Amino acid sequence: AQKVTQAQTEISVVEKEDVTLDCVYETRDTTYYLFWYKQPPSGELVFLIRRNSFDEQNEISGRYSWNFQKSTSSFNFTITASQVVDSAVYFCALSGRAGADTGRRALTFGSGTRLQVQP
Amino acid sequence: NAGVMQNPRHLVRRRGQEARLRCSPMKGHSHVYWYRQLPEEGLKFMVYLQKENIIDESGMPKERFSAEFPKEGPSILRIQQVVRGDSAAYFCASSPGAVSTDTQYFGPGTRLTVL
């Protein structure tokens, strides 16, 4: 069975601080995909990034960066110089390989980390 | 280029009534997924559909819940005889359905409140 753990329930930082959101996953699949989604107070889910299990290169997009370490089954998300608009709940998610077992397309979500950025 | 559309955004039902939630996928997407988010929790997978077919309904309760994605029109998630425990946000996602596992793009959700 797949599992995603986001141990940090809530994090509060002051604007301009850097913050890292942790994500640890479990899967038996050799090919899988990891995602981060943002859920702002308005409630919608915003896709941030997708990473496949063969690509361990870290990725940077503006103030966002992601650190994928297969050896520790972690896919952590760092926001540099946080801003009030970053306040949201952030979800890490995992999906398995496609193929005959098409049910694997379902995403398994972590319980989310609520980030509060104070001005 | 419209995203995933869901309606209604908010739905209030009394116990025992039926709830009907609609989802129109992004243009060009033929795969639809429904998830449920209980208060203060992450999203839980319910059902995965392609046009006219249910591919995986392993996350859907066996009773009172059903889903369809007809050849024409939106996908529908139907909850019969709602109970208070059905109060949640229901999210629909769509993907293009290429060979590899695709990114799922989510709609804004329908907040169901059962009185």
Image: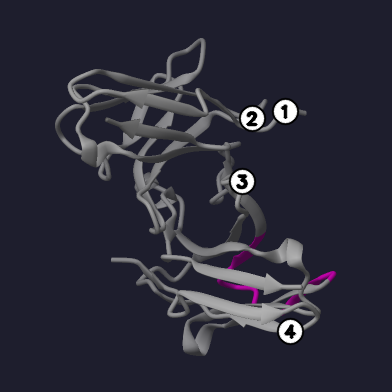
Residue B68: x and y, percent? Answer: 36, 21
Residue A77: x and y, percent? Answer: 64, 76
Q: Which of marks 2 and 1 is in front?
A: 1
**Mark 1 Cα-neighbour bin, 10 Å: few <14, some 14–19, many ≥20:** few
Picture quarter with the N terminus of chain B:
top right
Q: Mark 2 points at which residue?
A: B26
First in residue order: circle 2 vs circle 1: 1
Q: Name the residue under label 1.
A: B2
Q: Mark 2 lies on which chain?
A: B
Q: Kindly check if marks 3 and 4 are in contact, taking CB atoms under 8 A apart as contact.
A: no
**Mark seen at residue B60:** none
SS under mark 4:
loop
The amino acid at mark 3 is Ser
Same chain, labels 3 and 4: yes
**Mark seen at residue A18:** 4
Q: Which residue lies furthest to the left in this view?
A: B63
Q: Is residue B36 above or below residue A48?
A: above
| Left or right placement of residue A66 versus residue B1 in this view | left
The amino acid at mark 1 is Ala
Q: Which of A72 and A77 is in front in this view?
A: A77
The amino acid at mark 4 is Asp
Q: Name the residue under label 3.
A: A42
Residue A89: x and y, percent? Answer: 56, 62
